[in-house]
Image (spheres, rainbow, N blue to C red):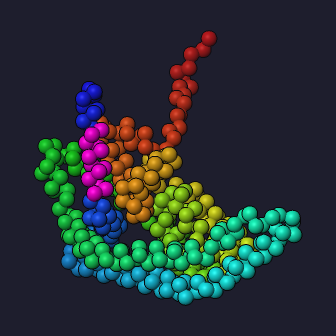
Amino acid sequence: MKVHQIVITIAAFVVVVAGMQAAKAILVPFLLAVFIAIVSAPPMFWMQQKGLPRWLGLLIVVLGILSVGLVVAGLVGTSIRDFSQDIPVYESKLEHQRVAIIAWLENLGVNTSKLALKEIFNPAAAIKLVGTVLNGLGNALTNSFLILMTVIFMLLEASSFPAKFDAISGNPQTSQAHLDKFITNVKHYMAIKTCTSFATGILAAIWLTILGVDYPLLWGLLAFALNYVPSIGSIIAAIPPVLLAIVQLGLGKAMGTAAGYLVINLVIGNLIEPRFMGRGLGLSTLVVFLSLLFWGWILGPVGMLLSVPLTMTAKIALDSREETRWIAVMLGPQVVKQLKTEPPGNSSET
């Protein structure tokens, strides 16, 4: 590739990124709609294969999306309202813990006047967190109608996409093979990731219920959503319930909460998920971290949530063509070289 072609490619990339940032208000709901449509399309196609009319399958899927959305909105709204009402109780417990820590440090001979423990154990930070969550929920509810309508139109057009790509391409057979491979890999990845995320959220909610941590369903929902971000998402999802367990139940139950999250994510993330996902659909740890920063910088919190699915989709698209497969290999995990061994009959004797 010539130097001027490299410069043009880099300039085009910068222009595209700047355009994505400028169109964030439209792009974020659209990407959420694409994400929901990809997850919802397989059940609709399955019902069509079983003989249901397309409109009936679409209606069932849309009603399912509405039901899940209403349940999630009700759960999050109720949890936030209850949490706001319980803030004075948590403030009181946090104040008692601060006094106990100061007394313990003073018994050890530590000068606590220079430690600024009042700023470290600041109950006002909880109120600020609640306000941030409420604002995020309001923004999501504002765009919910637009997202739902976009999902409906995408599902209506889903069956016609292959024919359109055939019409665009000069070689229909080759383009159809690439498209089929791309769609199959994306569906496989999203299906496995959704199932493992659902299992992570359920197990986290059950464990928190056993320990007695408040709002286990809310933290389970958070674990489900953030499990789409490997490694980092699990850590972020564990922080709020662990901090709440410290304030509500003490250090012992908080350590139990952290241990439960660690076991759940080790079993699902390191044993179950790789077995079904396969190494061919993986990303390197560096790429996961960089994609989190990149998409978060462009699209905000939603970009961080969808960073891995977006990068995974780009990797699958690159891997579907010979010309760009080397980029997909660079984005993937470490390649283990296999030593070639000669058949026993071909070895030469000296």
Is 143 on the left-hand or right-hand side of 244? left
Q: Main secondary structure of the magenta part?
A: helix
Is residue 81 rendered magenta in the image?
no
Query: Horizontal and vertical percent for residue 132?
Result: 46, 73
**Among the 4 quarters of the image, the one containing residue 157:** bottom left
Quarter of the figure with the C terminus: top right
Q: Is residue 332 above or below residue 301?
A: above
Looking at the image, which is closer to me, 196 or 213? 213
Is 278 on the left-hand or right-hand side of 11? right
Q: Residue at x 53, y 34 (%)?
A: 338
Q: How many marks?
A: 0
Is 309 on the left-hand or right-hand side of 230? left
Quarter of the figure with the N terminus: top left
Q: Is residue 19 above or below residue 209?
A: above
Q: Which residues are magenta?
A: 10-22
Looking at the image, which is closer to me, 220 or 13? 13
Q: Residue at x 52, y 61 (%)?
A: 233
Is residue 211 in sight in this rendering? no
**Among the 4 quarters of the image, the one containing residue 41:** bottom left
Is 286 on the left-hand or right-hand side of 209? left
Is residue 285 in sight in this rendering? yes
Q: Residue at x 73, y 77 (%)?
A: 97
Query: Horizontal and vertical percent for residue 234?
Result: 55, 62
Query: Horizontal and vertical percent for residue 218?
Result: 52, 78
Looking at the image, which is closer to me, 117 or 163? 117
Query: Horizontal and vertical percent for residue 322?
Result: 31, 37
Residue ranking furthest to the top: 350
Q: Residue at x 51, y 48 (%)?
A: 285
Is residue 21 rendered magenta in the image?
yes
Residue ranking furthest to the front: 113
